[in-house]
Amino acid sequence: MQNFGNQVQFRLYQTMHQPDPDRLPVVCEEWEEKAREVLQEGPYDYVAAGAGAGKTMQNNLNAFNRWEIIPRMLRNVEQRDLDIQLFGDTYPFPVLHAPIGVQSIIHEDGDLGSAKACAELGVPFIASSASTTPMEKIAEEMEDAPRWFQLYWSNDPDIAASFLQRAEASGYSAVVVTLDTPMMAWREKDLKNVYLPFLLGEGVGNYFTDPAFCAKLKKSPHEDPEAAIKLWTQVFGNAGLTWEDIAFLKANTNLPIILKGILHPEDAKRALEYGADGVIVSNHGGRQVDGAIGALEALPGVCNVIQDKIPVLMDSGIRRGSDIIKAMALGAKAVLIGRPCMYGLAAAGQQGVTEVMQNMIADLDITLALTGESSIKELNSVILRKAE
Ligand SMILES: Cc1cc2nc3c(=O)[nH]c(=O)nc-3n(C[C@H](O)[C@H](O)[C@H](O)COP(=O)(O)O)c2cc1C
Ligand SMILES: O=C(O)C(=O)c1ccccc1
């Protein structure tokens, strides 16, 4: 896409004649502020806060400040390529929408709004196991736009296998298996607010429509929602999994399997040994282990082990274009955008997600050019230095 960044930027400046209240935010922190204004405390904190004291979330942001870009000059950056290849598909930008459950708690557009915003831009949408809208409905709305499915690996193998089968049948082209959430973390803000969306029947759309899940209930989720929610709390996670269980996934899907939540180089080694098709370096946005390593800090160690044998993606802390450049220069093939999209969704529904994604990509395109690079795929750590 020619001069994507300049076009978006020019359009934004042209809104100068619009009255202020109609103008949507541009800056990530401003979107977050707007989200805080429109949401009640429970849902806002559910999205914005992390595990424990929030140290990991802080580490994620700080990690980006430890790297600095050294721009190059006079390198003809008129034509720029932002496209990437992953698992045999070409995508227009090196960004995906992170899997995010329970989007219905922040806006009525919910998962469908986000999915449609992504579809318009050609950005792959990773549908969460914990979406409120069932995966088939999301797929239907997205038509042939790119989409992946994120698996929460239930301790009930029938449910896990059924989710995999449904994802493949409804046209998702890869499975992201989230390993860092065998149970919900100790989340201080949610405990203080006494707020857990699932207990309110949010984020259970895939379960309540699942034949394997429903087979374990006496009455349908519609007839007896309380019993269904209780069953959900019993089957959601699986703390008993080991690396040997990866074979179960391979036996139950033909799609590429991408392991999300890899931080330790030793786990990167296991991911290769056990046949993962890709990994995502992530600490779940600091929502699981408090005091964990910032995701960007963990990225070089993982890439060093993987040695380009399979793609390494990353998330946790991406807030602007330069963050994407740093992650890719350190070895990520693409990044996932999480909370920024949710602040957009909260403040302005589907259009908010479109704006956040579009602005992030525009910023990326312009910053790439100003760094003196024209191909996102060819970035490497030569353009970075570790700040003192
Ligand atoms: C409200 C919320 C819900 C999330 N739900 C899921 C989920 O269902 N599955 C998953 O793998 N990750 C989930 N995540 C984690 C994101 O996929 C991603 O790793 C994280 O948002 C990255 O951190 P960042 O948003 O601070 O950049 C969730 C994150 C948030 C904020
Ligand atoms: O809140 C989360 O971070 C999350 O990943 C999750 C887990 C279960 C259901 C919905 C979201």
Image (spheres, grey):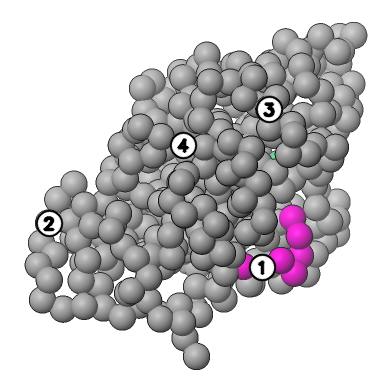
Q: Which residue is mark 1?
A: 293
Identify which residue, 292 or 200, lies in the foreground: 292
Which residue, given by chain and number where applicable, does mark 4 sit on? Answer: 125
How many residues crowd around disc 2 within 10 Å: few (fewer than 14), some, or many (20 or more)?
few
State which region is magenta. Answer: 288-294
What residue sits 51% from the left and 25% below the top?
A: 255
Marks 2 and 3: which is nearer the front? 3
Looking at numbered disc 3 in the image, what kind of residue is underneath it? Ala
Q: Residue furthest front?
A: 273
Query: How far from the left and from the top, in percent, is residue 60?
Result: 59, 68
Q: Nearer the viewer, mark 4 or mark 3?
A: 3
Q: Is residue 253 above or below residue 286?
A: above
Compared with 165, 9 (above or below) is: below
Please name the amino acid that badge 2 sits on.
Gln
Report which residue position mark 3 lands on. Answer: 247
For marks 4 and 3 on the same chain, the one whose residue lies earlier in the sequence: 4
Q: Is residue 291 left or right of residue 9?
A: right
On residue 79, which mark appears? Answer: 2
Q: Is disc 3's CB within 8 Å of ligand 1?
A: no
Foreground: disc 4 or disc 1: 1
Q: Within 8 Å of ligand 1, the CB of disc 1?
A: no
Q: Quadrant of residue 149?
A: top right
Left or right position of 213 against 70 = right
